[in-house]
Amino acid sequence: MDITRRRLLILLPAAAVAWKYVQAGTPEAAPNYKLTEHWWSMLIDIPKCIGCGSCVRACAEENDVPEGYYRTWIERYHVADWKIERPDVESPNGGKQGFPPNEIGGKNFFVPKLCNHCADSPCTQVCPVGATFVTPDGVVLVDKSYCLGCRYCVQACPYGCRFINPKTDTAEKCTLCYHRITKGLTTACCEVCPTGARQLADLKNPRDPIHEFLRRHTVQVLKPHMATGSKVFYNGMDGSVR
Amino acid sequence: MFKDVEHLIRLAVVMAIALIAFVTLRAVVVPHSFGQYGHYRGDAIREIAARPVAFAGHDVCESCHTDVVEQKKQGKHVVVPCEACHGAQARHADDPVSVKPAKLDTAVLCARCHEANSAKPKGFPQVVASDHSGGLACDACHQPHRPKIEDSTEAKPATEGKR
């Protein structure tokens, strides 16, 4: 085919479009990681949690979470005998520096919280631009280059797990340390937990110890009545936990 | 059939141009990975996965610090991962010579886990630090990698694990 002036004029814009993609390239994915072979979840053993705040600090460091915002946090519950339905819940600074002593009666315990990585997540359903989604391996992520910062998802999450990053003005949340789990590591919060109260689990891996744990224990998810398909399982959770 | 078809042809041309413009613009504006897995940009998954890690993981630590592993095996802190106390050490693991971990303040670190709190599990060892040591640093008596004090000769400051 001869390159005439006419053909060149037609080809130039097409080449310009193609060149953009050649330059941008495809980001390097983790080698040997197959999206379809995993279904990530987390197990939280409430009777093991000592409220030290290691997970909150590790999360902030691993993910550059701005000060005053939390992708994971710890709540301290105080349930007095006469008000099981109205527990006192506190989370000073997300539990980042631990909790001040409180020698009081009743039932007291810690509940670590994070994104529940719901299989039927309300937050992804309300996104008007496709900026948040459930990955094929079961992690709810935010594409910050697509997020408009409209805050629909922040309101939609029944667990209060999302916030607007004040620097980028986009929605932000726990990624289940997606950059770590795709490299074969565990999440930062699970990595530093001194008592093993938090365990990353892969529900699609038949050799994962979570299956044995789920068989032998009575576990619950947060707000099961909302049918979000939450994948963060809590062992030994009191009925007062919201 | 029609007397004057010219205006229809003009309309068809205008619509065809609009359609071509729309299809072209869409191809340019919508990222090529959009819709690869669903109604979102497939490359977003790979971009998020490409973020560097800050915490190396205890397997990495243990591959060099075998002496500390042996010490920890003798005590209850065997279950405590290295970076729970020492903080994120991926940079140290990548370049152990020039990046050295910071010295730790046991008064703060130990208290985070072991300061008494009614919400902590009953079986977990807890002390009221001011009553327990009277202001003395924890590592004056306890070796953090093997905290149990078996006899007085073993109570010495933590110097093991350093190279």
Image (tube, coloured by chain):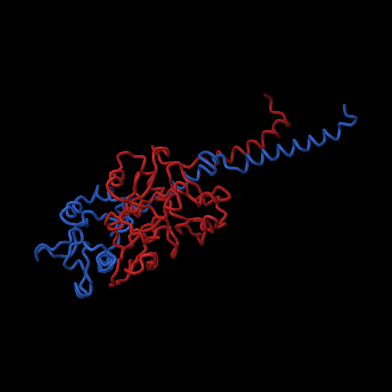
Chain colours: A red, B blue
Indicate the quadrant where residue A24 lies: top right
Indicate the quadrant where residue B23 lies: top right
Rendered residue at 28%/58% (across/down)? A47
Residue extending furthest front? A82
B141 or A135: nearer the eye?
A135
Which percent across, then down, holds residue A48?
Answer: 27, 57
B75 or A240: nearer the eye?
A240
Residue extending furthest top? A1
Q: Is residue A126 above or below residue A208?
A: below
Count of all numbered marks drawn on residues in the image: 0
Which percent across, then down, holds residue B72?
Answer: 19, 54
Rendered residue at 48%/42% (across/down)? A27
Horizontal side of A190 relative to B39 (left or right) equals left
Rendered residue at 88%/29% (across/down)? B2
Horizontal side of A21 relative to A107 (left or right) equals right
Horizontal side of B4 relative to B56 (left or right) equals right
Image quadrant holding the C terminus of chain A, namely bottom left
Q: Residue B91: in sight, yes or no?
A: no
Horizontal side of A19 relative to B22 (left or right) equals left
Image quadrant holding the N terminus of chain A, namely top right
Which percent across, then down, holds residue B127?
Answer: 21, 69
Q: Is residue B102 above or below residue B35?
A: below
Q: Residue A221: in sight, yes or no?
A: yes
Which percent across, then down, holds residue B102?
Answer: 30, 62
